[in-house]
Amino acid sequence: MGKEMYRVKLSHSFEGKPFSQVANVIYECYHCTLFAVEIVDRQGRVRVVMSPAKYEIPSGATYGYLIANDVDEVSKVSRHGWTEQRETEHKDAEKPAAAFNPLKLNVGWEAEDFMSSRAEVEKMKLNFHYAEEPFDLDDAVKDQVEELTGHILLVGSPQSYAFFVETLRRKHVEHKDIVILTTERPTNETWHRIRHFPGVHFIIGNQNLRKDLVRAGIHGVDTAVIISSQSKAERKLRGKAETGRTKREIEIRNELKGGGRLMDSDCIFTYQAIRKHCPTAKIICQLRRAENILFLGTDLGRDNDISVTPYFASGVVFLSAMMDRLIAQCFYNRDLLNILEALISSCKFSKLDFSGDVEPAELGFQSVPRSFEGKTYMQLFKYLISKKSTLPLGLYRRSPLDDVSPQPYVITNPSPDLIISVQDSVFALLSPEAFLQAPLGEIFVVVVEAELPPRRSKASSVSCLVESEGESAQTDSCINTAMPHWNFSCRFSVLDDTGVLEVSVFEEDKLRPDTFLGRVSVGMRALLEHP
């Protein structure tokens, strides 16, 4: 709680250093997450680029985007490693770039220019699961998909299917079939914008009818997204009520002004139906009235702040009022729209639009490596940013170790000393090389035994810590301190040949801190050359 996004001028001490190194230093020193930077493209336009890992910070005024607790932390980042005198010397060299006008941002696709050039097609094929030959709408509209499993189900009629579908068809996202249950057949214009994406199916039906939900495959669904939208009847009724003078129309108008608790009834019914028939499904439900969250089966009190309830924090519920909050936030933080554009519609530009080594990262979701069970978030952060070119933004906690919530929840920019679990998942900005570059190999380590000088304390024990490129594994404690025998084995992926394998031995004593006894290091290149 309390985290904010800030636009900050980066310190000149970061000039010439790659973005990943700068982000690592900032988090280690100030516990802030630097997740984006402004870069001028080939046409001279300022772009907000998400975590370009290898991009070197240029000289002059460079602005980045931070997740931090307060302005004081941001000020420290801006002054990092720099004296007031040297800051003054560089003042004349600064050339502030013109920022985007948020009111002129266009994050949508225009149907007429979607296939405007061969270059656009090649860009789409590079970044998406994309078929050069378009699919036919008649083939996409199906009578039923009851046998389908592991798919994503969209229930409702959003204003645009394109944003939903294209996000799930990026190459770093696991490919799953998308089933859309809607009351109306999509228009040709709507289909034109998604016709090149494979695995998109439409079921024409009513979400309030169990048979239609079954036709859409709710028994085998992996994730369901339920969109709240006004029906034709509701829109017609609202239009009449706004101008009507009869008693019934006045009653309807008063009900609509009072919020109308039944306006979310379709979403609530669909949520309960999917939960009943597929208890393991992940469900995201949009509600227009915040208090209707009570009908999802929670025992929350009516006076609770909905935005901090477990159902909201765990991502089960999305409130339409959040859009109002974003609009209000944009009044105080105009850069918010630029960030949302970069996160949601980063497909609008790629490395081809920039000079130099600029690889825009993609927002992704991945599991915590097993070797980080019981370790701190700081250790995970340093490993991912330095070895995987992946920038963590936060954690999704399925089974919180702190036991503060009965439901999973999301925490952004966690404390460095937060203990993580393998059941956690990481929201991260993934560099293309993070999911396209395969490991060089794997090493198998066996720690058998050690020969040590006699120890004074008879109550102590000895353990061994094996570390490789940010990952680690530890043996059990052995009470034989002179000739400890572990017979312990572990495996590590080799990401590059510049790493080092380290084996350290520690003496453990309940009455005092652990004592370091010794370490042996072997270069990864030597291990690869002489297996």
Image (spheres, helix red, strand yellow):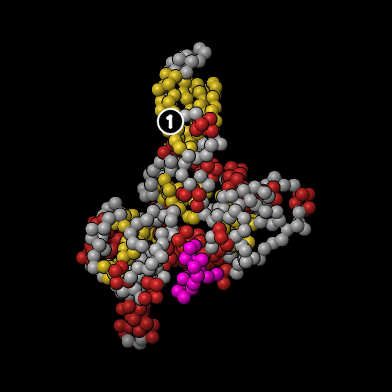
Foreground residue among 515 and 38? 38
Amino acid found under the numbered disc labelled 1: Phe
Q: Residue furthest left?
A: 211
Q: Which residue is mark 1?
A: 444
Q: What percent of the width, then of the height, locates residue 283?
A: 34, 57
Q: What percent of the width, then of the height, locates residue 251?
A: 33, 80
Foreground residue among 519 and 79? 519
Q: Quadrant of residue 169?
A: bottom left
Q: What percent of the width, then of the height, locates residue 480?
A: 43, 16
Q: Is residue 18 left or right of residue 326?
A: right
Question: In the figure, 155 relative to 470: above or below?
Answer: below
**Residue at image location 45% in from the left, 37% down from the top:** 441
**Residue at image location 67% in from the left, 49% down from the top:** 16
Q: Quadrant of residue 291?
A: bottom left
- Identify the magenta region: 105-123
Q: Is residue 439 left or right of residue 203?
A: right
Task: Say what secondary structure mark 1 lies in.
Answer: strand
Crowding near the residue tagged with mark 1, few <14, some 14–19, many ≥20 C-alpha atoms within 10 Å:
few
Q: Residue furthest bottom?
A: 245
**Residue at image location 35% in from the left, 87% down from the top:** 245
Question: In the figure, 11 relative to 317: above or below?
Answer: above
**Residue at image location 57% in from the left, 68% down from the top:** 102
Q: What percent of the width, then of the height, locates residue 221?
A: 29, 57
